Amino acid sequence: MVDETPHPDDESPLPDDVLDRAETLTRRIRDAVDGNERSAYRRERADLLDAHGYDVRVREGETGETLVLHPAEWVEDGTIRMDRVDDTDRAVERPLSGPGSGADWAEIDEHNRAIAARVRERHGEVHGETAEAFADFMSNHYAKPIERATPAEREEFRTEYFRRNAWPTDEQRDRLAESVRLTIGVAEDA
C-alpha cells in the first residue's frame, strides 16, 4: 500500500524521517560484518520504502557512493526503464561518501567534542558525560554536527545507543532527556 499523504516538504517526495532511516540502514548494510545483520537491515529498508512505493539502489561514482531512492514503478526486472521515468524530481539522492571520512570527519568530530566540553562547563558532569556520548554517536554514526541531529536520530540515541554504549550512571539515565535538550541548545547557540 502506497502512502499518498501530502508531505510538508515540497522539495522531497518522501518524508525526511523516511529518507534519514533509509540512509542509516544503507550505511548499516555497508558496515555490517554479519550476513544475517545485513539481511535484516535490507528487509527493514525494503519494507520502509515499499510502504511509500519506492525502491533503492546505490550508485558508484568518481566522488563515491550515492543512495538513490526512486519510484518502484520505474523498475522492471531489476532495471530502471527510462520510458517509465515520468518526472525525475520524484527521485531522491543522498551522498554516502564525503563527510564521515578523512578531514571532514575530523572537523565534525572536533566540533561535536567542543560542544560536549561546553555542555560540561555550563551544566556539569552529568550532562557533560551524556553530551560526550551524544558527540560520539553523531560523529561516528552519522558524521554530522550535533545541531543537525534529526528527531529520529535523537530518538535513536536515547533509546538504542545510550543504553548499550554509554555505560550511563543512574543519574545520567534519569536526566537523559534534559541532557539531550541542553546539548542541542548549546550546539544551536554555537
Image: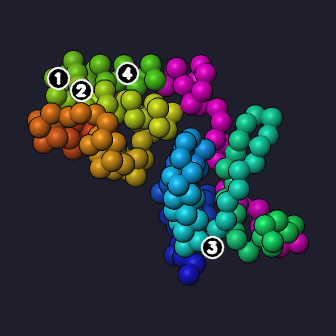
Residue 151 visible in the shown view: yes
Q: What x and y, as percent, mark residue 124?
A: 16, 23
Is residue 9 magenta-colored? Answer: no
Q: How many marks?
A: 4
Q: Give the range drawn in magenta.
A: 83-108
Identify the mark at residue 53; answer none if there is no mark. 3
Residue 85 visible in the shown view: no
Describe residue 27's horizontal placement relative to residue 161 as left or right.
right
Estimate how packed mark 3 is, as few (under 14), some (14 to 19) or many (20 or more) residues with alpha carbons within 10 Å: some
Identify the mark at residue 173; answer none if there is no mark. none
Residue that lies at the very extreme toward the bottom in this rendered image: 1
The residue type indicated by label 4 comes to Arg
Q: Name the residue under label 1.
A: 125
The local secondary structure at tag 1 comes to: helix
Check whether the beta carbons of the residues at disc 2 and disc 1 lie within 8 A of each other: yes
Nearest to N terminus: mark 2 or mark 4: 4
Q: Mark 2 points at which residue?
A: 129
Nearest to N terminus: mark 1 or mark 4: 4
Check whether the beta carbons of the residues at disc 2 and disc 4 lie within 8 A of each other: no
Q: Name the residue under label 4.
A: 113
The local secondary structure at tag 4 comes to: helix
Q: What x and y, as percent, mark residue 159?
A: 29, 50
Estimate how packed mark 1 is, as few (under 14), some (14 to 19) or many (20 or more) residues with alpha carbons within 10 Å: some
Nearest to N terminus: mark 3 or mark 2: 3
Q: How far apart are marks 3 and 4 (CA)?
A: 40 Å
